[in-house]
């Protein structure tokens, strides 16, 4: 078998991405298929599957693996609102320091973003968002010019999604984009259970000069079903002081600005 982009000698991170991309589509995979597709031994594949199972991404079975259903689990906005409130407030405080008068910013969904809203109401801003709760919170302030995307509402997260939401972001650019997520993995990237919501957030990131992730410690080393972007597509991560130092070190080593909020 000729070597190709997923062939012999590829790094484990690339093999893991191949396996997870395959599972996202097919839900199950055989060791024999992976050995052939990646041109590596079954010993190597079984080590890969063991690592991915340890990360709760899949469940090994005889001769292969299946996708872990937890990747699709998504608590509602209200269920998440009362969790890690001190951490989220501290993260929002640091995020607010980045926002200056006369900026154009994008705010996507997330309970940490909600904490941020309380701290920027006195700023002179243009705010674009696909989150209905953001507009509801800021619409009474004459100093803030609001732009709400179109799209279909996801009641679970208050997000507007779909083709209309993506198209409404065409030609709109931001100084900063702030957003939350469900999972932050150095290998798998920034993830969310919703493919449609990931597409809108990705578009926001593409249109921003500076993308800022608001992620408390509970999001690290977690993976949801669909990737928003890889880690190298963001510029700043704001997290709290319970995040493992090793995760912070890895991010800083690749040039990402990490701000640690002390609770």
Image: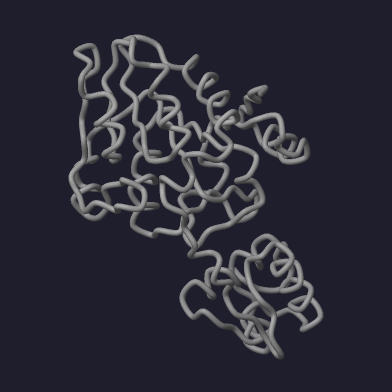
**Image position of 142 (left or right of 203):** left
Q: Judge whether 225 appears above or below 130 on screen.
A: below
**Image position of 107 (left or right of 142):** right
Residue in the foreground of this view, choosing between 54 and 63: 54
- Please state, as top left, top right, bottom left or bottom right, where the N terminus lies in the image: bottom right
Q: Judge whether 58 appears above or below 262 on screen.
A: below
Q: Judge whether 23 appears above or below 129 on screen.
A: below
Q: Quadrant of residue 66?
A: bottom right
Residue in the foreground of this view, choosing between 262 and 24: 262
> Which residue is painted at 66% across and 65% down in the image?
56
The x and y percentages for residue 73 are 49, 62
**Image position of 190 (left or right of 158):** right
Q: Quadrant of residue 132?
A: top left
The x and y percentages for residue 62 are 71, 90
> Which residue is painted at 50% across and 24% down in the image?
92
> Which residue is painted at 60% across and 30% down in the image?
87
> Which residue is painted at 51% across and 53% down in the image?
191
Colour approach in the figure: one colour
**Image position of 263 (left or right of 130):** right
Residue extending farthest right: 43
Q: Quadrant of residue 231?
A: top right
């Amino acid at each position: 078998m000729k070597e190709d982009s997923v062939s012999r000698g590829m790094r484990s991170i690339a093999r893991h991405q191949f396996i997870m991309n395959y599972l996202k589509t097919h839900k199950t995979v055989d060791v024999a298929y992976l050995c052939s597709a990646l041109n590596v031994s079954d010993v190597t594949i079984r080590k890969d599957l063991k690592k991915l199972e340890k990360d709760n991404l899949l469940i090994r079975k005889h001769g292969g693996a299946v996708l872990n259903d937890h990747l699709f689990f998504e608590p509602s906005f209200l269920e998440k609102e009362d969790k890690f409130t001190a951490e989220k407030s501290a993260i929002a405080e640091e995020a607010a320091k980045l926002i200056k008068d006369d900026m154009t910013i994008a705010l996507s969904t997330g309970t940490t973003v909600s904490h941020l809203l309380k701290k920027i109401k006195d700023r002179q801003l243009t705010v674009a968002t696909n989150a209905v709760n953001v507009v509801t919170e800021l619409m009474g302030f004459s100093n803030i010019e609001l732009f709400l995307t179109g799209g279909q509402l996801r009641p679970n997260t208050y997000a507007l999604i779909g083709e209309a939401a993506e198209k409404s972001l065409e030609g709109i650019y931001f100084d900063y984009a702030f957003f939350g997520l469900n999972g932050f993995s150095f290998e798998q990237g920034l993830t969310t259970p919703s493919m449609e919501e990931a597409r809108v957030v990705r578009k926001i990131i593409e249109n921003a000069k500076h993308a800022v992730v608001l992620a408390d410690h509970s999001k690290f080393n977690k993976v949801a079903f669909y990737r928003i972007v890889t880690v190298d597509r963001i510029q700043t991560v704001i997290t709290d002081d319970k995040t493992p130092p090793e995760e912070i070190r890895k991010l800083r080593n690749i040039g990402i600005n990490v701000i640690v909020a002390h609770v």
